[in-house]
Amino acid sequence: MSKAWWKSSVIYQIYPRSFADSNGDGIGDLNGITEHLDYIKELGADVIWLSPIYQSPNDDNGYDISDYQDIMTEFGTMEDFDRMISEMHKRGLKLVMDLVVNHTSDEHRWFMESRKSKDNPYRDYYIWKEPKDGKEPNNWGSCFGGSAWEYDEETGMYYLHCFSKKQPDLNWENETVRKEVFDMMTWWCEKGVDGFRMDVISMISKDPAYPDGPVADGLHGDLSPYVCNGPHVHEYLQEMNQKVLSKFDLITVGEAAGVTIEEAKKYANLDGRELNMVFQFEHMGLASGEYGKWTTDRVELKKLRAVMNKWQTELEGVAWNSLYWDNHDQPRAVSRFGNDGPMYREVSAKMIATCLHMMKGTPYIYQGEEIGMTNAYFKTIDDYRDIEAINAYKEYTESGLINEEDMLNDLKMVSRDNARTPMQWDDSPNAGFTTGTPWIKVNPNYMMINAKQALADKDSVFYYYQKLIALRKQYEIIIEGVFEGLLNDDENIYAYQRVLGDQKLVVACNFSEKEVPCTLFDGKEGQELISNYKFHKDGVLKPYEARVILY
Ligand code: NOJ
């Protein structure tokens, strides 16, 4: 096996709660995943990343873990896990586990001990601070609304939770905590897992001064400057690498909120001292405004291109990129960057896929993206299940900063639940996801948009993704070619080339619903590797047209 297999892999992300329910309780499960492995194999992805499947009270759908070495009751048993991983390996599919170690659940044994007394042996596993002037130690707001500090009556101190109050942050400065985490990771590696996606790993080292943060949204201080890319984060990851990662043949990706290019060059350096790659967020935050992500604004192509091109060119030869438009925390890619109306949904889904998959890095496909699933456009707050959406709705509408109608419109565009509606398998009730009542509403468009229909149509978005993946396996230039931006000021076209030896791969994508002039391909003889249109017109790109030509 080549050492850098993770460079040529394509990763398929499953959100287990919403993928496939095998026992009719309305919640997806491990047996449901095992039943659908052939579907992923058919697509051609080689690695499956599972959002957390560990024991959890589900305050944040599994990102609040109460036992790292047990399976969530609703998802099945350890026997189901063993069967699932063995069925994956039989098919040549690798398994990436979500590693959530910035925080645990408050129902984790460590925290239940920690909160008992100031001298409990587990006290220092978490971040406890004395009140300041009878109040919170600083003004930090949690990522899910409210203060990032929770007062605990038992000992009269506050604990830090960057996310919900049921997700207390672990104290990575404590060597024993690090050892516990590394031992647990080793246990999973010995069980045969092939890698880790590390949840908010850029947040594990905090600024020891715990200063107040700037108040931008009128509610709380921003904690990110003091918790992202903190003073010891690289030291901790290098230790993790020495003690665990380097001992196995793994793929590793760090979710790195607030990561800059300079930081990414350390996290994802090709020298292999830390991780293989990171998820950066710059292209996800481009439409953010006064109230953070809560806006209906769309991203301008110019800004998107500038950010993506910067990451492509600046990591060249130094570090490795991850490539994604979509995941369980983001709205649906076709709704956000393409056009999810009936006329252009398929063609624009193929166009954005082309734009991403021909770049340099490891591509991630989020369940349903490969059939062009769209945002849910829920009409009332009662349809939402996500703690972030529910808390933000409450906090912004109650404070009067955003009115109810505007907040509902913002949620329709950016809520995480857009990505969490059940996978649309077929046109039977509940999209074939469950025979019971789904934990979150199925998108009503499942009658039209579903995997069964996609598999029956040779021109579907599914087969287009299949071809993009196959091309990556076939042409080295897609993996190794050096990226160069083209038409950098064009209002509608995102174009670039990849260069390897005397080969050139030219990619042009029209992000608009207009026909636009494009002379990139005129008068040159090349081989078309893929396009979302059968017939082209000289000198133009049709609405949402994408073309990839090898010279
Ligand atoms: C990032 C995860 O992707 C998200 O779903 C989760 O809510 C937070 N980290 C907290 O774990």
Image (spheres, rainbow, N blue to C red):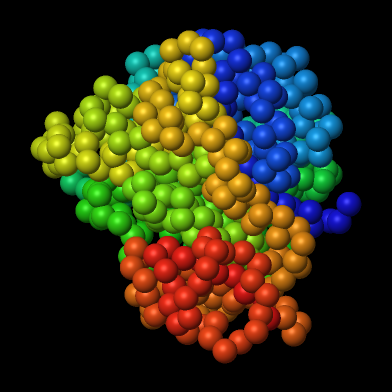
Q: Quarter of the image holding residue 179?
A: top right
Query: Left or right: 520 with respect to 225?
Result: right
Q: Is residue 433 above or below residue 49?
A: above
Q: Nearer the viewer, residue 153 or 368?
A: 368
Q: Is residue 390 above or below residue 116?
A: below
The structure residue drawn at horizontal position 29% and vertical position 49%, both measured from the top left corner, is 292
Q: How many marks?
A: 0
Quadrant in the picture for the C terminus: bottom right
Q: Nearer the viewer, residue 140 or 390?
A: 390
The image position of residue 161, as x and y in percent, is: 42, 33
Asked if one can make out residue 165 in the rendered structure from this viewpoint, the answer is: no
The image position of residue 527, as x and y in percent, is: 68, 75
Asked if one can make out residue 515 in the rendered structure from this viewpoint, the answer is: yes
Q: Residue furthest front?
A: 535
The structure residue drawn at horizontal position 82% and vertical position 46%, both measured from the top left corner, is 249
The structure residue drawn at horizontal position 76% and vertical position 38%, both measured from the top left corner, is 93
Query: Left or right: 376 with respect to 32?
Result: left
The image position of residue 384, as x and y in percent, is: 32, 27
The structure residue drawn at horizontal position 61% and vertical position 25%, both measured from the top left corner, is 53
Q: Nearer the viewer, residue 199 or 158?
A: 199
Q: Residue furthest right?
A: 1
Q: Nearer the viewer, residue 246 or 110?
A: 246
The image position of residue 181, as x and y in percent, is: 67, 33
